[in-house]
């Protein structure tokens, strides 16, 4: 069974940083691209970042709105992916989802982790 | 950037009704469109991929159609467990989500 679990959320002051983790199991992690998607309260979904697998040299891509403040990384030995977000702003308050990208795109998602940016 | 306009934003329907939700792309996205269901407090679930392919395990009352710029998700006979928010995702050029449709029971 595919399982995806995000951790690391919480309350952060504006200007602060946060590292989100996403642990996966139940599939061959090495074969897949992984993504982060976020959803601000009462808003729609926004793609944040993608990291490809070893076959694609772990290439990374970011949403323009966040580029320069986010870094996505992965550890294939731990079947995990990470998202580092810096210079946090109130508008970064959202549920952050980790999602697997197969040939059908985002086919499995985690439950999400809440990040609140507030003083 | 490709924009996805989803309609309606809210929908109220009765059990057994045929329900349709639309997504319009700002440019041609071929058939690179997925539909997702998100129940309150749960992770999104893939329903339809590549416009009209039903994801494994999804009931056949869900179907998708369209190509180019106009797409439709249809629930042929609404069930109580279908109460959720539905959203589309284009993946022709990176990824852009529709704004979502909240479906409630009348």
Image (cartoon, rainbow, N blue to C red):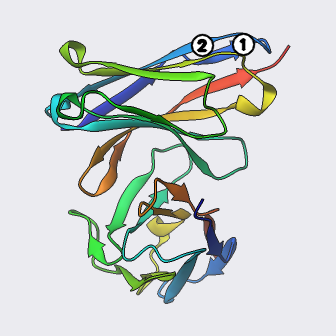
For label 2, count other residues whose C-alpha is less than 10 Å away and answer few (under 14), some (14-19) or many (20+): some
Q: Secondary structure at mark 1?
A: strand
Give the side of residue B9 with respect to residue B21, left or right: right
For label 1, count other residues whose C-alpha is less than 10 Å away and answer few (under 14), some (14-19) or many (20+): some
Query: As drawn, which residue projects farthest toward the right?
Result: A119
Quadrant where the C terminus of chain A lies? top right
The chain holding disc 2 is A
Give above or below for A42 relative to B78.
above
Q: Residue at x 80, y 27 (%)?
A: A90
Can residue A26 be seen from the camera position used here?
no
The quadrant where residue B34 appears = bottom left
> Is residue B11 or residue A8 the one in the foreground?
A8
Q: Residue at x 22, y 19 (%)?
A: A76
> Is residue B75 or residue B3 the one in the foreground?
B3
> Is residue B42 or residue A23 the one in the foreground?
A23
The chain holding disc 1 is A
Give above or below for A26 relative to B53.
above
Considering only order in the chain, which callout, 2 or 1, is on the residue closer to the N terminus?
A: 1
- What numbered label is drawn on residue A18? 2
Look at mark 1 in the image and give the residue it sits on.
Answer: A12
Q: Are marks 1 and 2 on the same chain?
A: yes
Q: Secondary structure at mark 2?
A: strand
Quadrant where the N terminus of chain A lies? top left
Give the side of residue A4 with respect to residue B100, left or right: left
Can residue B67 be seen from the camera position used here?
yes
Q: Are marks 1 and 2 in contact (CB under 8 Å)?
A: yes
Q: Position of residue A68 (x, y in %)?
A: 62, 24
The quadrant where residue B52 appears = bottom left
Q: Tell me the distance, in whole angstroms, between the alpha carbons under discs 1 and 2.
A: 8 Å
């Amino acid at each position: 069974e595919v399982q995806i679990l995000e951790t690391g959320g919480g309350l952060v002051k504006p200007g602060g940083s946060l590292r989100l983790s996403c642990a996966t199991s139940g599939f061959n992690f090495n074969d897949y691209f992984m993504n982060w998607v976020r959803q601000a309260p009462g808003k729609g979904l926004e793609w944040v970042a993608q990291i490809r697998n070893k076959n694609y040299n772990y290439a990374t891509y970011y949403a323009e709105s966040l580029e320069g403040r986010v870094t996505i990384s992965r550890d294939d030995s731990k079947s995990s992916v990470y998202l580092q977000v810096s210079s946090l702003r109130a508008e970064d308050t959202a549920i952050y989802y980790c999602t697997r990208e197969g040939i059908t795109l985002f086919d499995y998602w985690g439950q999400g982790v809440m990040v609140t940016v507030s003083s | 950037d490709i924009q996805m306009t989803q309609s309606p934003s809210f929908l109220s329907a009765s059990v057994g009704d045929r329900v349709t939700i639309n997504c319009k792309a700002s440019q041609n996205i071929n058939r690179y469109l997925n539909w997702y269901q998100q129940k309150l407090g749960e992770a999104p679930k893939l329903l339809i991929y590549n416009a009209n392919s039903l994801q494994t395990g999804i009931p056949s009352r869900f179907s998708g159609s369209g190509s180019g710029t106009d797409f439709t998700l249809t629930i042929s006979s609404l069930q109580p467990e279908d109460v959720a928010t539905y959203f589309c995702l284009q993946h022709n050029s990176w990824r852009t989500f529709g704004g979502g449709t909240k479906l409630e029971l009348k």
